[in-house]
Image (cartoon, grey):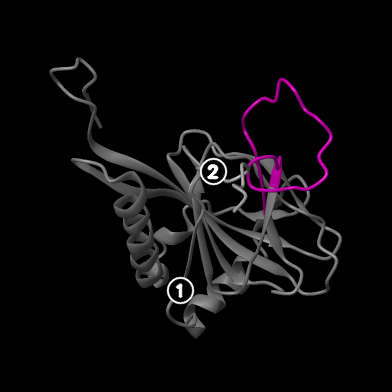
Amino acid sequence: MTENKNNCQIFSIFPTPIYISKLNRELTNEELSIINKTKSYVYKNEGNTTSNDNYILNNKPFKNLKEELDLKVQNYFDKIICPYNITPYITQSWINYTEKNQFHHKHNHPNSFISGVFYINCDEKFDTIKFFKKDYERIAPEVKEWNVWNSQSWLFPVKTGDVILFPSSLDHKVETKETDNTRISLSFNVFIKGTVGNNKDITELIL
């Protein structure tokens, strides 16, 4: 028997988490009514429009929705961060409206630990969110086949009802929309309270 000298194992260390879940219900008529009314009170973002109310989840009719998103956030921390003495909480939240031929510029979210998007309305055949690799590449050879290690960006298709959570420092964007429906998403930032670090290591920070 000839030994296959190309046998190997490839491990992925220090990966970037992209958490994808689903809201387990339909939005209520009251919630949808506010979302539709909010569309009349927006400002022009770079490529699309954003609600003037950037604490949208603090509105009383969104109380249940906020609690459900809080559970997703806590699940992200439990599965990925696994911290001691830390409680995550949603800070700002806002609604984005993206029409045909509009886009959402490449950006990240400063002053936030993780960020999230809840998709209220989208075209699952065409709508995506695009993430970008953060590391600087000192050497960039031509690539004949893309994979999770050599890619500089990555697209995820999105569906109505999806909830996506990711590190706030991760650059992301929405490509120019080509279909006629209005893409509606509720975005939010998450910070933490509690004790970070360790007293004996002189790294303690109480938030």
- Amino acid bearing label 1: Leu
Secondary structure at badge 1 equals loop
Q: What is the crowding at mark 2: few (fewer than 14 residues within 10 Å), some, or many (at least 20)?
A: few
What's the residue at 64%, 38% (across, down)? 133
Seen at 70% across and 43% down, the residue is 151
Judge by depth and name the residue closer to the eye, 121 or 157. 157
Predominant SS of the magenta segment: loop
The residue range painted magenta reads 130-153
Quadrant location, the C terminus: top left
Q: What percent of the width, then of the height, locates residue 178? A: 85, 66
- Left or right of 54, for residue 101: right
Q: Residues within 10 Å of mark 1 (few under 14, many from 20)?
A: some
In the rendered view, tell whether residue 187 sits above or below residue 199. below
Foreground residue among 76 and 150: 150
Identify the residue under disc 1: 23
Marks 2 and 1: which is nearer the front?
2
Kindly identify which residue carries mark 2.
10
| Horizontal side of residue 13 vs 159, given as left or right | left
Disc 2/disc 1 C-alpha distance (Å) = 35 Å
Residue at image point 83% right, 65% down: 100
Q: Note whether 111 is above or below 35 in the view shown.
A: above
Q: Is residue 131 magenta?
A: yes
* Residue extending furthest toward the front: 1
